[in-house]
Image (tube, rainbow, N blue to C red):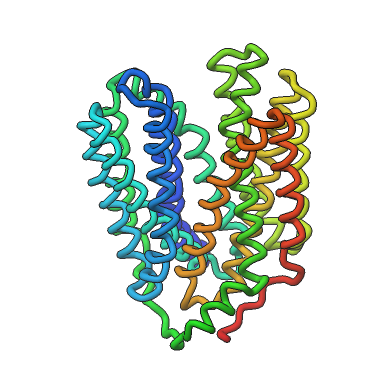
Amino acid sequence: MNEVASAIRGSQRWPLYAAGFTTAFGAHAVAAALGAESADIGLSLLGLGILLALYDVAEVFLKPVFGSLSDRIGPKPVIIGGLLAFAAASLIGLWAEQPFMLAAARLGQGMAASAFSPASSASVARLAGARTGHYFGRYGSWKGLGYAIGPLLGALAIIAGGFSLLFGVLAVVSLCVAVWAAVAVPPLAPLPRPRYTILDVWKQSTERSFLGPTLVLAAATGSLGAAVGFLPALAAREGFGTTGSVAVVTVLAVTSSLIQPRVGKLRDHGSVSDRAGMILGLAAICCGTLLAGLAPGPVAIYAAAVFIGMGIGVATPLAFAHLADATPKERLGRTMGSAELGRELGDAGGPLLVGAVAVTAGLPWGLGALAAVVAAASFAAPGAEANPSND
């Protein structure tokens, strides 16, 4: 009987992992396609930058809003509504040969992902029970898979049928996940919440149990964003060619995806503490970043990708699990939305930091600056295990 119940609970979580995959796959598949086809559709570098930023800009502003909404009405309708909106926004991309329609599709996808991404995280936390590390490891692994295969599948779709095929695939994927979530995910009712004052919200947002893991997530995600852009650039300088350059990112993402579930299990078994694990993960990211900047060459670049992937794979599930355990269940949506806001800011800030320093001092110094910021973030890792309180 317990085995059956466990299987049912597992089936309830799988659509949530698929939702995480969808947002990562959609973001990176379209971004890679835009970069590859920008000249053919008449985009300037500025126009390309704007189109790439629209997805993240929408998430920065809306994730905390939709996270709070999922606390008020329950996460399931927010997940399903967000996935359906993602499918609708993707259909706009069927006319994506025009930059204006591309912008509308990209912005709409970002707004929709702002809804189902934090609501999915909150649902994983509520369904995880005492095994938050294990299930956030799986959730992160599926997101990492989306990051890994998104550019590859995006390129294949563009070759086979252009932007219309790519956005059509994204519409079908998100629609299927929405139906799956509607059938399998249990209706998690909103929990009674105390009335919070502005002062209460400020205190909750500045507690180390929230700020620490959020800064760790921002540092890890900023490193991912920088690595996705600059490791292929380094590989191209070494004469890897297009395939070899893109493969560096795939190695990073696959490494992260393989490690996250294992780290989550170790955390649940008490074999690794949150603070020690987060610091270890950030240290691995620093090593990989410095290796890429100081020791160029084929072996060093791929080794850097492995180190950075390992660091992200260790730090991310521990940070999310700590947030989940430290947060009262009735405000998990708001907390996850705000934490993902931190991730988005890191995703934008990491490449900007490396690029800004590299312009004046060279790419090795830019990567060194990123390593220094990541190292500094390790001091923010929370010192005690999660202990939720209702204020």
Q: Nearer the viewer, residue 38 or 47?
A: 47
Note whether 22 is above or below 338 in the view shown: above
Residue drawn at (45%, 50%) of the image: 20
The quarter of the picture where residue 293 lies is: top right
Quarter residue 130 falls in: bottom right
Nearest the eye: 269 or 88: 88
| Placement of 188 over or under 149, stated as above or below | below
Q: Position of residue 389 (x, y in %)?
A: 60, 82
Q: Quadrant of residue 25?
A: top left
Indicate whether 298 appears above or below 123.
Answer: above
Residue found at x 75% / y 71%: 384
Q: Is residue 12 visible?
A: no
Of all residues shown, which one is farthest toward the front?
360
Q: Is residue 314 found left or right of 1 in the rendered image? A: right
Residue sitting at 74 percent across and 34 percent down?
365
What percent of the width, then of the height, locates residue 295? 79, 25
Is residue 248 found left or right of 113 in the rendered image?
right
Q: Is residue 113 above or below residue 68?
A: above
Quarter that holds the C terminus: bottom right
**Does the rendering let one see residue 231?**
yes
Residue shown at the point (37%, 24%) measured from the top left: 38
Question: Residue 376 versus residue 43: which sits nearer the camera?
Answer: 43
Residue 296 spot, x, y in % from top left: 75, 22
Residue 329 position within the rendered picture, expressed as x and y whole percent measured from the top left? 50, 76
Image label count = 0
